[in-house]
Image: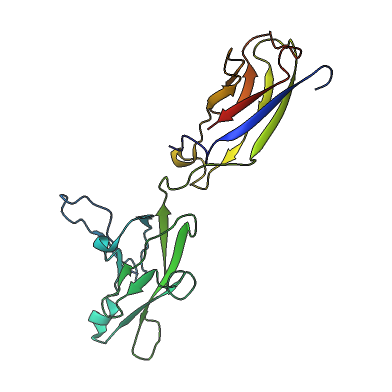
Amino acid sequence: MALRADGARLLLICFAFGNALHLETFPRRSQHEPPKHTHLVRQKRAWITAPVSLREGEDLSKKNPIAKIHSDIAEERRIKIVYKYTGKGITEPPYGVFAFDKDTGELNVTSILDREETPYFLLVGYALDERGNNLEKPLELRIKVLDINDNEPVFTQDVFVGAVEELSAAHTLVMKVNATDADEPNSINSKISYKIVSQEPAYPAMFYMNKDTGEIYTVTSTLDREVRESFLLLIF
């Protein structure tokens, strides 16, 4: 969970008087779990696709091959077959993310993935004869990049300035601060929590914050401009 934003931000609060293909995929497994292969059989000579999910920011070389395409036609016809992949990460930028074996149809990941750069890859697999003719209908393979909490939230402003009338009732909304997170939207990794770290002058505490919304409210109704014109809050 993203618990705090990128560095502290200052809040200045002032008072105002008035207005305010056959395909095999190899799922993730633990070190102690035996390999499990998902075999998808061909129906009426159509290649069957399945999505692949890979976690960003990790060395995935031990998971190779992550997928394998296979055509039975070569065995049935006793001809040499060549496998090929195209798409992002191979023939389109970012290049060099994947590599494949033209003889076995195995697909390997060769780079550390970044979901914020490329959230998913769409590859197309081919089974070709020696002349480059398709022996099967080209097959789509979708690879989703799984998010990790690798980005800190960032405030949308360096300094937020709010105002509230003196003698306002307790629990009056003063202002709202906002931060953004580059991790996957609507996930635990992009959830932001706000907190008042300090107030100047420190006592008495005059404000509290909704940690989920970034809204700041008054604690009491005793704010007096003649006693104190402004407060400085430090928030994370």
Q: Is residue 54 above or below residue 228?
A: below
Residue 215 in picture, x, y percent from top left = 62, 26
Q: Quadrant of residue 11?
A: top right
Q: Nearer the viewer, residue 37 or 41?
A: 37
Residue 46 position within the rendered picture, expressed as x and y whole percent measured from the top left: 37, 69
Q: Is residue 135 left or right of residue 31?
A: right
**Left or right of 206, for residue 39:** left
Q: Is residue 223 left or right of residue 111?
A: right
- Quadrant of residue 65 in the image? bottom left
Along the viewing direction, whichever of 51 and 42 lies nearer the viewer: 51
* Front in this rendered view, residue 5 or 11: 11
Q: Position of residue 201 (x, y in %)?
A: 61, 19
- Is 51 situated above or below 193? below
Is any part of residue 23 visible from this angle? no
- Give residue 127's position: percent from left, percent from top: 35, 78
Q: Residue at x 49, y 73 (%)?
A: 92
The colour scheme is rainbow
Whether residue 72 can be seen here: yes
Q: How many marks?
A: 0
Quadrant containing the N terminus is top left
173 shown above or below 102: above
The residue located at (70%, 12%) in the rendering is 223
Q: Residue furthest bottom?
A: 131
